[in-house]
Amino acid sequence: MINQQLLLDLQFSKLSDWRDFYVTKSNSEAVQWLQHFLSIDINILWIYGDEKSGKSHLGKLWANSVFARCIIKRDLSIDSIEELLQENNFFYIDDADLIKVDEEWFFHFFNYIIYANNPKLKILIMSRKRIINLGVTLKDLSSRLMTATEIHINAPDDELIKKLIWKAFFEYGIRCSDSDINFISSRINRTYVDIFEFIDNIHRLKIESNEPLLKVVKNLLYK
């Protein structure tokens, strides 16, 4: 008999409310800007950060809380812009650097916003890159984007790393102690992608081997 469990590709339920978004020094500036976005005199807020840094989670929380319209590919026709702006005041665009978009559409979209002179119009844009690093070819669009307020989500600090590990273990149903989390957090690579990849590997190997958590962790760290 093979003492090994098969790993099933199960979909775990994800917590999705504000109480589940951990605020630390790494992301507190972005959170504070979003908390006051509706009351301050700016139209476009551009938040950028590394992959897996919580941008989409944070953006969706804001969008849901103000009933913002999430702009997706089917919205990208110039004829739709005026209608969109008549029906909505709040917009959310995720992964702006990754989606293949029509630069001319965004240029007209931002022009409508400027000419509307409507202080209630708010556009939240999430991206992995700074505006200056997007490689926009349309100069007029680049100049429009540069009017946005840019906020950076920083690399995870010690507190956030521990909270991310705890949250992931909780969602995967893996029991752990504070000493387990301290051991892991002090030894893994300190990027969002590496943290989540390491946790996913722990989950996979723990199910396959049914070994104690720290043994699985040490096997990954020192293999």
Image (cartoon, helix red, strand yellow):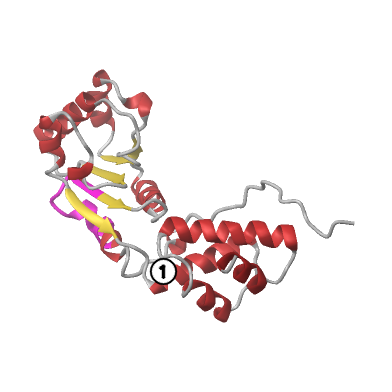
Q: Residue at x 55, y 62 (%)?
A: 168
Amino acid type indicated by mark 1: Leu
Q: Is residue 117 above or below residue 63?
A: above
Magenta stretch holds residue 34 = yes
Q: Residue 214: which quarter of the image?
A: bottom right
Residue 203: x %, y % from top left: 63, 59
- Asked whether, in this view, residue 134 is left or right of residue 52, the answer is left
Residue furthest right as drawn: 1
- Asked whether, in this view, residue 23 is left or right of residue 180, the answer is left
Extent of the magenta region? 32-46
Q: Nearer the viewer, residue 3 or 128?
A: 3
How many marks the image carries: the answer is 1
Q: Residue at x 28, y 31 (%)?
A: 87
Q: Residue 106: which quarter of the image?
A: top left
Q: Which residue is mark 1?
A: 160
Classify the position of the C terminus by image quarter: bottom right
Q: Nearer the viewer, residue 24 or 191?
A: 191
